[in-house]
Image (cartoon, rainbow, N blue to C red):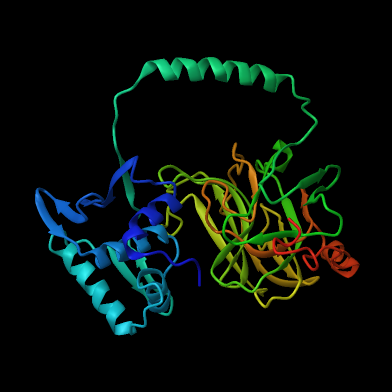
Amino acid sequence: MGIRYPLMYMDKFFMEEKGLSLDNCKGLWFGTVYADLNTKSLIKDGEQQPLSELSFTLLLALVEHQNTPLTAEQLQDIVWQGVITGNENVKQRISILRKAFQALDDQEQIKNIRGKGYLLAQPVKLDYIKSEINWQPLFMCAAMLLVVLFLWSLWPTTQSKVLKSEQSQLSVFQGEVISLANKKANLAFCLDGFDDYVEVFDDNLDVHKGDFSLSTWVKTASLGQHIIVDKRFEDQVSDVQGYVFYIDDGYLALQLADGDGSWYCQEPDSSCTFYDSKAFVADDQWHHVAVSIDRDRNKGIRFYLDGQFNSAFDPTGRQGSLSNEMPLRIGSRSSFKTGLFKGAIGEIQFYHRVLTPSEIKRTHQKGNVRSCSGSGNKGGI
């Protein structure tokens, strides 16, 4: 159920998990209501509603998972950290939070989505600490940047630029298909779900407005949201742009984001769309998974599981460019160190075209030659 943290450190953990440390963020805006991270209170027009440590931790849990509804059981695990408490206790604490908001503003802040859980009703905006600019370090950084850019210009443009995590070595093979695999023969990317991921800086993995396909093998027993590959720009302030192939509560899923609208994907005018398949893979067995995206065709998104067609969706609402400057990450979100994959990912194949059902079936029939068995505690990475 995840790493457990002492309650006194929960607020700092949630902030840092999203890249919002207490060093650079002093508060959060929930519409017209301001949450002060220092005083742990809600404020509007000079009126203040202080929150208890537990209520504040619960609020931060909803912020950290603001794109995903949390059930009462999940909130118990995150906020109460394994202490046995009933669902009624969670409901009571949610009610206290709602009343604190309602004392300042009539706008709904916490929704209860039937059958799914609790979710913030609107995006949260960040209030960063403003500081005076010390120009001397900036000039030094600018000079260093010029040197780096010069050296970068000398790098061969045909060679992929790969940043390796501490545990992983990556090889990139390019041709009609771009293959990403562990350099160690017959070993998968064996990821611990805590701090393992791989970054690939390669413009050939970028998608503008064309079709594309992804194919790989995965093995995991973890539910929740876990990234297979992600190449998106997202900062929770501006538009989202890119693509991500991932597992959501055990099922394969895809997101396309063309930067046209709000960053909050649950809003009608958002810049991103979720496509949730019926392909369940979180059974601790190896599965071949694939998705092909024909972007101007109805039912052009097609999910495949173990060589068989699974489900289809309409991508025609996302005709804009998916291009962005972020690296592709294996096992983690591109912009944040979250959604970390726990399990194994085999060789990943990327195509700038739509794979046919027969091609996907043949890939599955070839079988998976990579695994994590017999490779030590770190799974060969």
In the rendered view, does 317 fall on the left or right side of 181?
left
Residue at the spot x=82%, y=65% of the render? 357
Q: Is residue 121 above or below residue 25?
A: below
- Relative to residue 299, is residue 182 depicted above or below? above
- Res 268 visible: yes
Picture coordinates of residue 73, whole percent (x, y): 41, 78
- For the point 22% across and 68% down, the residue is 98
- Measuring from the top left, give residue 130's x and y in whole percent: 29, 32
User: Residue 313 appears at what percent x and percent y?
Assistant: 63, 65
Q: Quadrant of residue 346?
A: bottom right
Q: Residue at x 74, y 39 (%)?
A: 204
Q: Quadrant of the C terminus?
A: bottom right
222 shown above or below 255: below
Between 188 and 67, which is closer to the camera in this rendering? 188
Query: In the image, residue 200 lies at what x, y percent?
Result: 69, 43
84 vs 321, nearest the viewer = 84
User: Looking at this view, is 369 or 354 the one in front?
Assistant: 369
Quadrant location of residue 254? bottom right
